[in-house]
């Protein structure tokens, strides 16, 4: 009896046929797929500071100070910020609020202030930057 030899050849023709059929299916099906569109919110970019803004300043140590439209600045804590914003908005609902973050201030401290402002439904909020 003669020993069997191993075959080291693979017939790849069926695999190529399957791949070509799949390619044709994908080429036909792709244009029929619906593409979703994402509508991004629009933002404004202005180099001019709004007239008489209410500034909320985040200092390097995380403390908060506010500067009203008259230029008067006072230090407050985070709990007082909501009360001050409500008071100012009752007097002027279209009041622009600028958030001024110190260069050394932590990013999460600025975000917390922005979140508090967002909860007050203020329409005109901006970030003030200073170029040096």
Image (cartoon, rainbow, N blue to C red):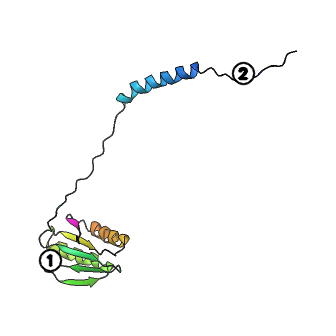
Residue 123 in the image: x percent, y percent?
A: 20, 63
Is disc 1 placed on a helix, strand or loop? loop
Answer left or right for 99 relative to 19.
left
Residue 113's quadrant in the figure? Answer: bottom left
Compare residues 131 and 24 and report the one nearer the observer.
131
Residue 69 - label: 1
The number of callouts visible is: 2
The prevailing secondary structure element of the residues shown in magenta is loop
Compare residues 57 and 83 and report the one nearer the observer.
57
Instruction: Inspect the magenta stretch and tell me whether residue 125 lies in it.
Output: yes
Residue 7 - label: 2
Which residue is depicted at the point 32% across and 81% down?
A: 77
Q: Which residues are magenta?
A: 122-126
Instruction: Inspect the magenta stretch and tell me whether residue 73 lies in it.
Output: no
Answer left or right for 124 relative to 51.
right
Is disc 2 placed on a helix, strand or loop? loop
Residue 103 in the image: x percent, y percent?
A: 31, 74
Residue 12's quadrant in the figure? Answer: top right
């Amino acid at each position: 009896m003669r020993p069997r030899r191993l075959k080291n050849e693979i017939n790849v023709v069926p695999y190529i046929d399957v791949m070509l059929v799949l390619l044709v299916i994908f080429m036909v099906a792709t244009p029929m797929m619906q593409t979703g569109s994402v509508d991004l919110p629009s933002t404004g970019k202005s180099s001019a500071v709004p007239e008489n803004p209410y500034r909320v300043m985040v200092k390097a140590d995380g403390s908060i100070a506010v500067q009203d439209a008259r230029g008067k600045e006072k230090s407050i804590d985070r709990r007082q910020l909501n009360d001050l914003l409500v008071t100012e908005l009752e007097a002027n609902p279209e009041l622009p609020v600028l958030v001024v973050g110190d260069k050394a201030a932590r990013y999460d401290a600025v975000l917390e202030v922005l979140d508090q402002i967002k909860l007050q439904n203020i329409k005109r909020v901006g970030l003030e930057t200073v170029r040096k």
